[in-house]
Image: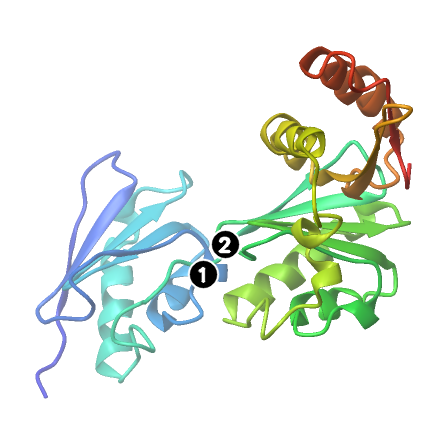
Amino acid sequence: MNKYKITSKVEKDNPWAIFVSNQSIGPPKMQTFENIDYTKDAPLAAQLFYLPFVKTVKIGHNEIHVERFDILEWDEVDSEVAQQIQDYLNDGGMVFKNAVKSKDPVSVYAESTPNPKAMKFVANIPLVEQMLEFKSAEQTTNVPLAEKLFEFDFVQEVFFDSNYISVHANIDWNLHFIEVREFIKDYLDSGNPVVTGPINPQQIVSLRHQTQLTEIEKEIVDILDNYVRPAVAADGGNIAFDTYNKKNKTLSLILQGACSGCPSSTYTLKMGIENMMKQMLPGKVKEVVAING
């Protein structure tokens, strides 16, 4: 087998250096790694991140692009880095565990919500096709990620929407959000499924209380879907239709996700949703209440 030969290209004041191989080392499309967390399937990139000045690594067909932190110049170290890459390859070191990196790494970030008991964890991939709500571990059949989250002894409720999870816990989230975020990220990044089979209809938010709706109830649901849901989803929650009493014109709603138990939910209901319903459905809604407020 021909030996690898690595040469470097550097420019003064340019944070990027290019290391060129005399033979192919990777896929045609350049793969980017922003930190060592993303290098599970890229051992060469992982090796480069052990160098304290390395900020970003890109690997393509026969080139490795490395961005440095602004703590030194490339002409101080480029020959040593080229030699390290060359020795690594000639000693049989792997560039990728798979011929082509098939997916982008999963990222998860945490967002606080108006509810101090709820934290929102947002992923860069789709999680579920429909909103799901779990009040206990016993309800999590065929949703292993929810089941695993309940293994944290402080978790009380779990709510899924398309690309985020709201987790309820009676704790100081400042002390715990990192471990929950890292758990979710590692779970998803390992390719583990969120859902593995049929889900209990009672855990599917859209299937609850949606039997035979009257015309006014359909109008209410449309308003909730189009005007209320997008706003509260940004805070990790949902407000769903429960019942409408035509006689006393009272609309009952269910607070879910971060909205459940939120101290500001009363204000949202009265000053937001109740006023909206009165304006959009004049004479049809007199009061809005939450059955779990």
Residue at the spot of label 1: 38
What percent of the width, then of the height, locates residue 199?
66, 68
Which amino acid, mark 1?
Tyr
Q: Nearer the viewer, residue 4 or 256?
A: 256
Q: Nearer the viewer, residue 120 or 17?
A: 120
Instruction: Reply above or below: 53 against 214.
Output: below
Residue 151 visible in the displayed image: no
Residue at the spot of label 2: 126
| Picture quadrant of residue 103 | bottom left
Q: Quadrant of the N terminus?
A: bottom left
Instruction: Reply above or below: 83 against 284.
Output: below
What percent of the width, then of the height, locates residue 17?
23, 48
Q: Secondary structure at mark 2?
A: loop
Give the residue displayed 19% in from the left and 66% down from the top. 27
Give the residue displayed 87% in from the left and 45% down from the top. 172
What percent of the width, then of the height, locates residue 215?
66, 32
Of badges 1 and 2, nearer the viewer stands 2
Instruction: Reply above or below: 251 against 96.
Output: above
Which amino acid, mark 2?
Pro
Give the number of callouts.
Answer: 2
| Label ID, residue 168 | none
What percent of the width, then of the height, locates residue 85?
26, 68
